[in-house]
């Protein structure tokens, strides 16, 4: 690569560690013990076709810019149009088609990511994966582009090769309840050794007030090979699909709702809502109640089939109607709202929260609930684990706040370890590395202040980096990783 | 004690202090000035019978595990049944009865408390009070048990001896409004010099929708020696009970409500609610209004009798119905909810907030109110003081957040000092020590960043550790403590 | 000045910087690059008459104590009556009139400001502006008073001389929509070179349920020289007044509401509310809807006239009715409430949030919205910028929390730089200096942890201290400041 007048890109070996030597030295030592551990990826959005087909990745812009709403929303917020970034439109509006010109525009504005996780993830990816050694900016844009493009052409950059290189022990995708899981099936039949598992996400089937609900129901009928036209058959179909997901390695379900309200409806109420939905006349309140009831049913089914239940509430989707109309969903315009857990989850937790067969992983976009509601719930109910900082909170400061606000009440052992929650396959190592560094640094702060001793911190570091995710999702012990002799004290769930 | 292969238990002299030497050295110096100050315990739940009877403490499990919901809720959250921990049941379910076996189970899971205040309090207690020198774990469980048991048998470990050793200047208990305070009376008559005072808590009498309310009213009638059957007589009875508490040294009242709503009802509304309550037909809304009105009456009575008013809102009690049904209340299943102060306290503060005779100490489980509502209220109304971080927030990080979010608006001089809020008598020194260390460290951070100078920090440290609690609750100057000559600048309330 | 036994007042050159040398050294370097930059003051409450008349400031008490509710509310909260501090009353109650006696009372209680921004601002002002070298306390009160009084008498302390000395590039005042702006006009005509501009604040005209609304409307009629008696003429009058403000250099509007609700009303609904208001029968709900609609109209007009729109929601004004009745508004008794942005701003942002002509600066008193709502909105909508920490949050810890909670999602480039928001002209340099120090220190922390490199941090420091405020409010490049050659990368809005 030409260097010219470019600024050097450096990944400091001590990045994200406190500069105080008493903390930094311990952080290094703890990180050194976790950096090589395999990656457990229990929740994410990688397309399984990627690993099934194992085709070369496209050129850099299609790989890194146009599919990543973390990136283009930031440029959009500063007046760079999404059309000029090549984001595909639904309404036929023309968009920029030259990837190099889009890449240049991105690089011109890369300064916007200073101090953001997207910036540090991307720098990691550029440096570590693509061996870029110059800072990305308007001047270096095209040489960086060319270097990435060159790397992507080589066999070592095929998805399965990277899966191995990344040391991924298990990768969970997120899939519609009606998905045929053909790629997952094909992957299992291919003889390739990588563990890629589906996750059951029935959201669209629960949105009975949506204009698309009847289409979703038709897909469910098709998937099950029979007509689904009553609530009872609907519930049975969901139970059946769950088992299908499980048969292909699925470990969990996932549920996105605006409000985590739970309640038990009576059979005739459910029948009536179902009939209105089939009739395209279900209301928003119908949907709210139906979702609330269905969360209860999903918890009940989890006690039977053992799928871990994940709850991701609190995002108001598609806040920007013009952007949604032109570009569709997942365009960086989902905005969080305040979220209540204590009262909303009362029905579900009273029904199933004491059941040792249920694991319910709670996520939030509302950090005010960490110390106030989630840690007390996690520190009491056997079923509850707290998911890692999600989305906007999946960041250096966000992770630190999570540990500081949750640990003292819930302990780390009621948390679910890390997940990368990404559709950007190539960013997976950067995200885990950042999390392991931040956790090592947080633990080092506890050691430096003599809140825990170094032995305890070492066990905690391994739990946070690897064991808690593996055990929460019941992935079992894998060949890839032999715990050190003293790891038993880290405490797998008994 | 045998050491064998046990890990050593160490209490580092600089624990909880920042590792940066510029901060740590100042923290040490400030802590050295407060560590020996007497303990003011203005709010807690120690049983006065303990000090009246002065009997030896029971064996370690009955002392440390079964009465402490901070401990058993954590084990329960990880799947250890409460029955296996010997928690007594109300429904006759059999529970484990062997204290050594319970202790072993606790020690096996003690790693759960890594990085929690319960963990550091208990380590302090083990090391400092019981002179344990090995880390508690499954291996050391029974030698630790035996050592504690041995110490408990000696006269130096009787409650009154510990009261003196702990250097407690005053200890407030929390007592039902209808309590005869027989232990308090006996303590005063015993000639023993320890200052133990009751706190007036009338919550149960205000819950007019509760099935137990008529029993409570009957107890009130009995305590007053006359029939209480109208609102007017009810209010008079409460005023009388307050004076009785005051006559036995009582300094404060305490009020736990879900929502700190205050409003003034009309006499006929009060009569109607009272009649419905007597009739067992009062509604939840009746209770909400009644409590809101009664907080106003309690504030009014405080302006007359001088009892400090404490308000502890925001806990939704007994969230887990199955646990409540089997084990009763205070089982670690109380979960906080978001709490509003600005509008809810408007009526009360407009009526009495400018009255110099009222001191209203506000607590919260909702940290979002620290900077947004509580500090602005405390920094304006003469009557308002902010109570220390409560319950889940009574921790290293929680205390630090409180100082960081409250001080700049309210100043430390509108806060109420520390209280330990504990029923675990033997944990009192550990809790005060932690608070004094955390405050010293926070002040040292201000000194290191030149926000305050060392002289000011020294005065602030004494205020936080001792004077603010003493003065907020109007305990007066005691013989145990002579302030240094320059302490006047710490500013007692004029 | 006599020193006697007084304690020395010292402003440490490294104040507000972390003590860890790896951070402090970088903080110093960054601060050294921003400390001399001109001050942009885009939002504040200085009286323009001050600079127009350019008369000597009054004696110290009238300058520093009686107009500053940050100061007297704190003394009031500790039982010092506002009458004893000389705060003027509306009801004829006599107040202390001796400024030296008030000053003494203030100094006696100055310890209350330990660790508060008011304390550090005032120390800065005393040391740097008035060259005081002794700590203010009861003992030094009157020598400090005399020294300030002596300085104020000299020509170098006239407002315009200080304006130059403070290196203010532009100072925005806040003015009622009906204000004649006579001082602003006179200032422009005076030939004096200082740039002082008005800000359009129509709040009083939107409070249709207020007893004062008809008076406000009459003033609007007078200001426009015609009868305003329909909603249509009302809206036209506001548009006209905006242009008048703009003609005198106005760059922005400002809107204070309790709740930032926005919605579009129909013409007949607006006519009906307007008629009820004219009739003194508008309700609180009328006002809520009217304000919600008018925020939409204000945004629309901003897209036409280019005035930047500022929104300051969430303060419940005049919480203490007795204080309001006796002393009026702005007496330190405004208390924040929880504030919702995601749903409330939906209508406005969907209508104008994608419009490149609108800049909407959002402020909050509810820090829980930083990471949850404001950063996601700012990191998506082109129109949105996040205002700096406001009021109670304008402090060392408050600013640090803002950066930590906002940057990772919104980037610094969607924030609006600093404003001092003060009516205390002499405190302006202290406030900007504190902000520049805190930002330099926060950036130094990023450098020390290798989140950004030093080059990036330097560009970010200049943006935070100067460029973002200048560019958000479209003040243009001024002669006072030539950016270094590499400042282009700091990224002005395209």
Image (cartoon, coloured by chain):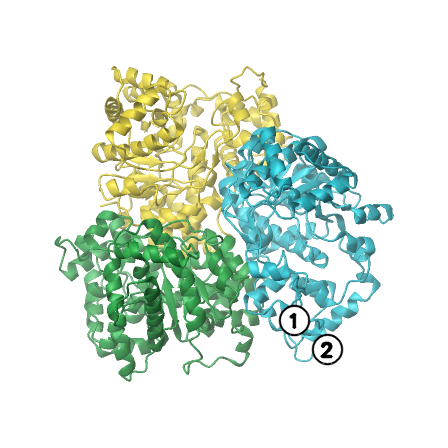
Chain colours: A cyan, B yellow, C green
Instruction: Name the residue furthest front.
Output: C268
To which residue does mark 2 refer? A2
Element carrying mark 2 = loop
Q: Which residue matches tag 1?
A: A136
Pick whichever of labels 2 and 1 is earlier in the sequence.
2
Location of residue A419 with respect to B326 vertically, above or below: below
Q: Can see residue A387? A: yes
In the foreground, C84 or B320: B320
Q: Position of residue B283 (x, y in %)?
A: 39, 27
Of the 4 image quadrants, the one containing the C terminus of chain C is bottom right
Please tell me whether mark 1 sits on a helix, a strand or a loop.
loop
Q: Are marks 2 and 1 in contact (CB under 8 Å)?
A: no
Which residue is painted at 49% across and 33% down in the image? B125
- Left or right placement of residue B105 versus residue C442 in this view: right
Up the image or down, A360 lies above or below C469; here it is above
Labels 2, 1: one chain? yes
Direction from residue C83 to residue C366 in the image, left or right: right
Residue placed most toward the observer, A133 or B54:
A133
Residue B169: x, y in percent?
33, 33
Q: Is residue A271 left or right of residue C125?
A: right
Instruction: Determine if residue C394 is in view.
Output: no
Q: Residues within 10 Å of mark 2 (few under 14, many from 20)?
A: few
| Residue C446 image position (x, y, % from top left) | 55, 62
Q: Nearer the viewer, mark 2 or mark 1?
A: 1
* Quarter of the N terminus of chain C within the rendering: bottom left
Horizontal arrangement in the rendering, residue B268 relative to residue C337 (left or right):
left
Which chain does the residue under circle 1 lie in? A
Q: Residue at x 33, y 22 (%)?
A: B276
């Amino acid at each position: 690569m030409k260097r010219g007048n470019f600024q050097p890109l450096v990944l400091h070996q001590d990045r994200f560690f406190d500069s105080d030597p008493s903390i930094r030295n311990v952080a290094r030592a703890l990180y050194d013990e976790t950096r090589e551990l395999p990656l457990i990826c229990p929740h994410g959005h990688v397309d399984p076709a990627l690993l099934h087909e194992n085709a070369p990745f496209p050129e850099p812009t299609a790989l890194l810019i146009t599919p990543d709403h973390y990136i283009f929303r930031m440029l959009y917020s500063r007046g760079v149009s999404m059309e000029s970034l090549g984001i595909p439109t639904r309404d036929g509006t023309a968009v920029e088609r030259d990837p190099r010109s889009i890449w240049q525009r991105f690089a011109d504005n890369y300064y916007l990511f200073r101090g953001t996780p997207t910036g540090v993830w991307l720098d990691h990816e550029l440096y570590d994966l693509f061996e870029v050694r110059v800072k990305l900016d308007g001047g270096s844009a095209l040489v960086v582009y060319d270097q990435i493009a060159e790397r992507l052409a080589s066999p070592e950059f095929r998805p399965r090769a990277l899966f191995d290189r990344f040391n991924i022990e298990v990768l969970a995708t997120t899939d519609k309840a009606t998905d045929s899981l053909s790629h997952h099936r094909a992957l299992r039949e291919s003889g390739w050794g990588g563990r890629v598992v589906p996750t059951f996400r029935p959201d669209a089937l629960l949105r009975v007030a949506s204009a698309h609900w009847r289409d979703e129901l038709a897909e469910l009928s098709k998937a099950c090979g029979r007509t689904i036209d009553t609530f009872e058959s609907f519930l049975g179909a969901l139970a059946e699909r769950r088992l299908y997901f499980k048969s292909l390695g699925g470990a969990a379900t996932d549920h996105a709702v605006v409000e985590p309200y739970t309640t038990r409806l009576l059979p005739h109420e459910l029948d009536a809502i179902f009939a209105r939905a089939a009739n395209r006349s279900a209301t928003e309140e119908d949907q709210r109640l139906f979702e609330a009831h269905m969360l209860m049913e999903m918890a009940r089914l989890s006690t039977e089939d053992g799928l871990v239940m994940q709850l991701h509430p609190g995002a108001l989707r598609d806040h920007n109607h013009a952007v949604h109309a032109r570009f569709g969903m997942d365009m960086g315009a989902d905005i969080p709202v305040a979220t209540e857990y204590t009262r909303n989850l009362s029905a579900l937790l009273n029904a199933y929260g004491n059941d040792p067969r249920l694991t319910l992983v709670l996520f939030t976009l509302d950090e005010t609930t960490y110390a106030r509601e989630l840690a007390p719930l996690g520190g009491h109910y056997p079923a509850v684990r707290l998911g890692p900082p999600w989305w906007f909170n999946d960041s250096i400061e966000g992770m630190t706040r999570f540990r500081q606000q949750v640990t003292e009440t819930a302990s780390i052992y009621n948390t679910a370890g890390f997940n990368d929650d990404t559709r950007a396959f190539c960013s997976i190592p950067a995200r885990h590395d950042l999390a392991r560094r931040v956790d090592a640094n947080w633990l080092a702060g506890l050691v430096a202040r003599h809140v825990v001793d170094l032995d305890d911190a070492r066990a905690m570091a391994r739990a946070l980096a690897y064991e808690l995710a593996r055990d929460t999702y019941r992935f079992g012990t894998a060949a890839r990783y032999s715990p050190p002799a003293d790891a038993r004290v880290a405490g797998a769930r008994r």
